[in-house]
Amino acid sequence: QVRLVESGGGLVQPGGSLRLSCAASGFTFSSYSMGWFRQAPGKEREFVAAIRWSGTRTYYKDSVKGRFTISRDNAKNTVYLQMNSLKPEDTGVYYCAADRMGMQPTGIGGYDYWGQGTQVTVSS
C-alpha cells in the first residue's frame, strides 16, 4: 500500500520555524520527484516546493524563496521542508506528494500520490 505520512506541523508565532517531514512507503521513492503543496480554508491548493529524484534540482514558490528549504534522504524514504521566518500567510494544510514522471514539478496535476496533510498555523 502506498503511504505518504506528513508530520511536524503545529502552531507557531510569526518569525518562527517549523520542519515538516514526509515518510514514504509502498513505491520506489528514489525514482520519484517530491513536492509540497498547501491549502488555506476556502482557497485552492497551491505549489510550495519540489525536488527532483536526485536532489540536485529544486523549485520554490516565489513568496517562500529564501525562507523555505526542501530536501530529501532517499536512504530513509523521507522528504523534508524546513520553514523559517514564518508569516501568517503561510498558514494552511501542507501536503506531501510524489510524481513519477517529473515533467511539471510546480503543477498539481502530475502528481501520482498524496498524503493526508499536516496543519501549519502562524499566529500571534
Image: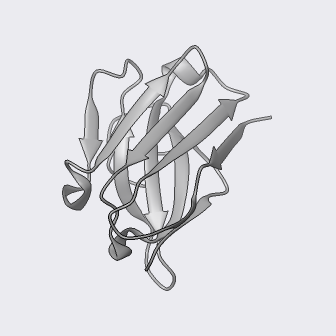
Residue drawn at x 41%, y 43% as measured from the top left: 82
- With respect to residue 40, does 47 lie above or below? above
Residue drawn at x 64%, y 35% as measured from the top left: 23
x and y, in percent, of residue 68 in the image? 31, 48
- With respect to residue 124, does 102 lie above or below? above
Q: Quadrant of residue 91?
A: bottom left
x and y, in percent, of residue 54 in the image? 38, 17
- Farthest top residue in view: 75
Residue drawn at x 38%, y 68% as measured from the top left: 90
Would residue 36 be visible to someone looking at this image?
yes
Relative to 68, 39 lies left or right: right
x and y, in percent, of residue 72 in the image? 46, 27
- With respect to residue 45, does 96 lie above or below? above
Q: Is residue 63 or residue 14 the one in the foreground?
A: 14
Q: Is residue 14 or residue 88 the one in the foreground?
A: 14
Relative to 122, 85 lies left or right: left
Would residue 109 be visible to someone looking at this image?
no
